[in-house]
Structure formats: structure tokens, C-alpha cells
Image (spheres, helix red, strand yellow):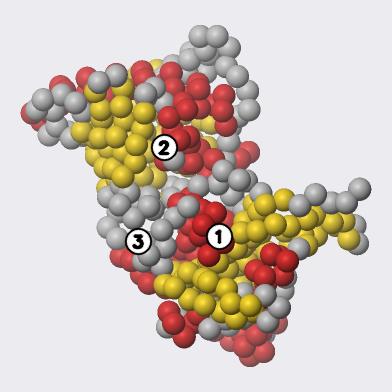
Amino acid sequence: MLPKAEAAYFAIADISGYTNFLAAVELDHAQDIIADFMDTVVKGLRPPFRLAKFEGDAAFVYTTDATVDGSLLQDAIEGAYFKFRRRLRNVRQASACECQACVAMGNLDFKFVVHHGEMVKQRMGGREELAGRDVILVHRLLKNSVSEKVGGRAYALYSDAAIRAMGVDPVAQGLIAHHEAIDIIGDVTLWARDLEAAWRQDDARVRNEVTRGDACATFAFDIAAPRQTVWEHLTVPGQWQKWWDADDITEDSGKGRRGVGTRNHCLHGKAANVEETLDWRPVDYLTVSIALPVPGAPRIIVTRALLDGPNGTTHLEVRIAKPKPKDKAFVEGAAAKYGERMSQAIAGLRSMVEGKQPAFGEVDEPTLKHSTGRFLTEPVKSGARR
């Protein structure tokens, strides 16, 4: 039987400066450094991507998920690069080694090439290989002249096919138009993001996170799904609406890309809550300002934070900021109602991402403790001992 063609997004994470680095430094230290950075980037890309194979100085990844969100996919690419830059900075600051490899690691960087097309899976030499015209194309796109246009080696390069499949407006998002002539294919339209500039902007952005100590209420839940999956269901309106008690959720992101400034209108009946994103750190946390449909109501600041739990699970904390003294009674009352609503909705979220349906009437009910005027909720699954 002939292999079946599948539509897929392909991405290659390629180390810039690899050849010069290996040629000039101690091989044992160099390989440890390369392996560390490559591992950091590949983990940052999963999900939505899965590893096809390592290719020397590059990692070839793909996803056949036809519903992958364009904003999430770009967040995965840029988030993987940001993780590399933070790892590079942390290693350099913590290392006391003065070998040539450790000194020269700062010359390494990453570039990403992303394409959408068709592929087939074949068994070759006892392992699965991806094949097809578009698999060839994404590899050919690694040899390009983008660095001359963005002025650096760190970039994300999207084929026009990938942009169209993601449904994003590259001009509105500030992507740089580019063209390459591929010998066996011809002229290819491309769009580039300067990742060095994106990193500087992200690194300089002031964090706006409600910590546990800053919160008047914290609702915590454990979900048996990866952080990226939970993040998607918290932030993509179509996924969010499936488990959150809302008639409709509409998004206004301005540039077609979620982030700081994105406004969500959550409609329930004739009333609408409006959430404006104040801080956006995929897949760690987002902070929003919520305007309730109540005359004179104060804006409520909420951080939804995702932390790694055991065995690939996610620990979700919803932290509501302490209000001004005059707003204390209103915010604490609203927080209690929000906690009840969130606890019931989490049962639906779990049924979606954990692949099981909750029993009739099953609700994740938090216990509520009072401590110096601060609420702290702890998740208790139905049937668990309290």
C-alpha cells in the first residue's frame, strides 16, 4: 500500500555559527554545549511540534495538526528562541570555565525556517522518515540571504504557504517580505521575523505578574495535560469558549497576534466582561485587567500562571491582585464567585484535555482558607478525602 500524503507544518531549528565553533574549540566541551542548547530549543518547540530527527547542527520538527493556531505557532517558535537566549545567558553567568568552547559559546545563535505543505511517512533503515517536495523545500530554504536583510543571524523565516495556512496578516504583524529563488522550485515568497530584535523587546519588557504574595485570592488546579495544551485552551477564543461558561468570546488583537494589548469580550447573556492583556509570557503566564459589567466596578487584575507538575501535568494558578482598600469588599466578593465558576469550568477543561468525560455533576471544588485577609484555594477532586 502506498503511503498516504498528509498536510503538515515543517520547521527547522538551525544553529548559526556551528562550523566555526567546532573548528576552533575543544570538541568534548563543544558537543556538550551544542547538545544543551539544542535540547533547550527542541523542548521549547514541543508542542505543537514533534521531533522528526536531528540533522547535525539542526533539528527537523513537524506537526500534522490541521487546527494549530497561527498565533500559538509563532509563539512556539519565538518562545523556543527566547529559552535559548535565557539559557545562554544563564550558562555564561554561572560558568567559571575558561576553555575556548565556553568562551566562544556566545558566538552561537539560532535561525528557524517554517513551511506548510504535504509529506509522506516512510520506513527506512528501521525508522520513520518524512519525504516529499515540501520536505525538500524547507531544507533548501536554510540557504538564503535573509541575514543581509534583517542584519543578523537570528530570525524566523516563514514561507508564504505557512503564512496562508496560519491565516495571519504578515504586513500587519511587521514581518519582512523576502524572496528566494530555489533551483528546482523557482521563486518562493517568504516572510521574516528578526528574532534578535524580538528578544531585546521581550527581555526589556517589564513583568506584570500577580504573585502569590500580591494576591488576595489564589485558585489552584492540577490538570493532567502539558502546559502548552492548557495554555492553548486558556488563550485561544475558540478553545476557551468550549469549557468556559460564555455564550461567545471575541478577540481584538489589532495585529492578528495575541499579546500585550489584546482585548477579549466574554459575552454571557446580555452582559460582557472585557479582558485586556497586560502581560503575555507564553506558556508561563498571562496577566489581564477585567472590566465587569457593573457600574462603578473597579478593574480586577488577574494572573493565570502555568507551572510544571509531576509526570507531564500542569499546575494552574489563578491569582487575583489585592485591591485598593475602598474596593476590598467588592473584589473579594467577585473573587469568591469567580472561584466557584472557575472550579466548575475546570471539570469541563479536564474532560477535553485529559481525554475523558467527567461523571454527571462532577465538580472540582476548592477548599477556601483564610489567612491574614488572603484567600488560598487548594484543588480537591470529587471523591477525594477533604
Residue at left 63%, top 38%? 311
What is the three-letter code of the residue carrying label 3? Ala
User: Which circle's residue, 2 or 3, is located before the other in the chain?
Assistant: 3
Give the residue at mark 2.
237
Residue at left 55%, top 9%? 360
User: Which circle's residue, 3 or 1, is located before the other in the chain?
Assistant: 1
Mark 2 closeness class: few <14, some 14–19, many ≥20 residues within 10 Å: some
Q: CA distance from mark 2 to mark 3?
A: 20 Å
Instruction: Indicate left or right for 178 with 261 as reference.
Output: right
Contact between marks 2 and 1 (CB within 8 A): the answer is no
Relative to the observer, which residue lies in front, 365 or 163?
A: 163
Q: Secondary structure at mark 3?
A: loop
What is the three-letter code of the residue carrying label 2? Pro
Furthest residue in direction bottom, as rendered? 24
Q: Residue 333 in the image: x percent, y percent?
A: 22, 19
What is the three-letter code of the residue carrying label 1? Ala
Give the residue at mark 3.
172
Mark 1 closeness class: few <14, some 14–19, many ≥20 residues within 10 Å: many
Residue at left 57%, top 73%? 188
Relative to the observer, which residue lies in front, 372 or 360?
A: 360
307 in relation to 168, above or below: above
Q: Residue 131 in the image: x percent, y percent?
A: 78, 62
The answer to whether one can see residue 65 in this image is: yes
Relative to the observer, which residue lies in front, 188 or 335?
A: 188
Q: Secondary structure at mark 1?
A: helix
Give the residue at mark 1.
162
Relative to the observer, which residue lies in front, 138 or 73?
A: 138
